[in-house]
Image (tube, rainbow, N blue to C red):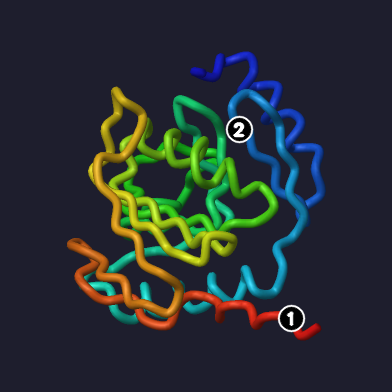
Amino acid sequence: MTISAETRREFHRFDDMLGPEYRAELIAGEIIVNPPPHGTHEQVFAKLNNQLVKKSAIEIEVSGHRGIETPLGDYIPDMTITEPDTFGGKPPWGSPEGILLLVEITSSMRASDRVAKRRAYAAAGIPFYLLVDRQNVESVLFSQPDVEAQDYRADIRVPFGSDLELPAPFSFTLTDFTPRAPRPREL
C-alpha cells in the first residue's frame, strides 16, 4: 500500500502535536503511537551503538530518533546508521538517502517489525535491516533489498548469544549485543 501525499501530511500534523516522549509511525496507512521503550530495549540499543561506533570499518553516524519516509509508510527506526553528515540541516522526517543500516528491536508491535517495516525498508532501498527479535530469541540481518518486490533477497539468522558478522562497509563481528535469554520461571 503506497502512502498518499495527503495521508502523509495528515500524519505529520498529528505527529507535530505529540509530546516529545512519544513516537508516532505511519504503518500500512495506520497511525501507531509508541511510549518510551523499556530498559531491556535500551540495553540492546546501547550495546549495538557502542560496537557500531567503535568497530565499524567506516565512519558512521547513529540516531535513535530519525524519521524515515518510505513508499509504504513513515517510520522511526530504533536505530539509524548513516554515512557522515547525513542528518545535518535536515527536517525531522527525511528520505532514506545515506542510510546504511536500520535496526528494530522488537516490542509490542513485533509483527510490524517483522513484516511491514521489513518490506518498507526494502522498498526504500535500505541496504541492511537488523531485526533483534526478542520474542523469537534471534537476530536477523536482512540484505540485498529488492525495491520492486518490496522485500530483501537474503537474510542471516542467529540465535541470541551468537555473534553476527556485519559485512562491508561495516566489516566487523557484533558480539554480545542481545539481551540474555529469559530464565525459566520457577513453580
Amino acid type at mark 2: Ile
Instruction: Mark 2: give few (<14), some (14-19) or many (20+) Cα within 10 Å.
Output: some
Look at the picture and state if 108 lies above or below 118: below
Residue at 76 percent of width and 85 percent of height? 186
Cα distance, mark 2 to mark 1? 35 Å
Q: Is residue 54 left or right of residue 41?
A: left
- Residues marked 2 and 1 touching at CB (< 8 Å): no
Residue under label 2? 27
Between label 2 and label 1, give the one nearer the viewer: 1
Residue under pointer 1: 185
- Percent from the top left, x then y, of residue 144? 23, 43
**Is residue 49 depicted above or below 78 in this figure?**
below
Location of residue 139 (image quadrant): bottom left
Residue placed at 34% from the left, 41% from the top?
Answer: 97
| Mark 2 residue element | strand
- Look at 71% across and 32% down and name the residue there: 31
Residue 163 visible in the shown view: yes
Name the residue rendered at 63%, 32% in the picture.
26
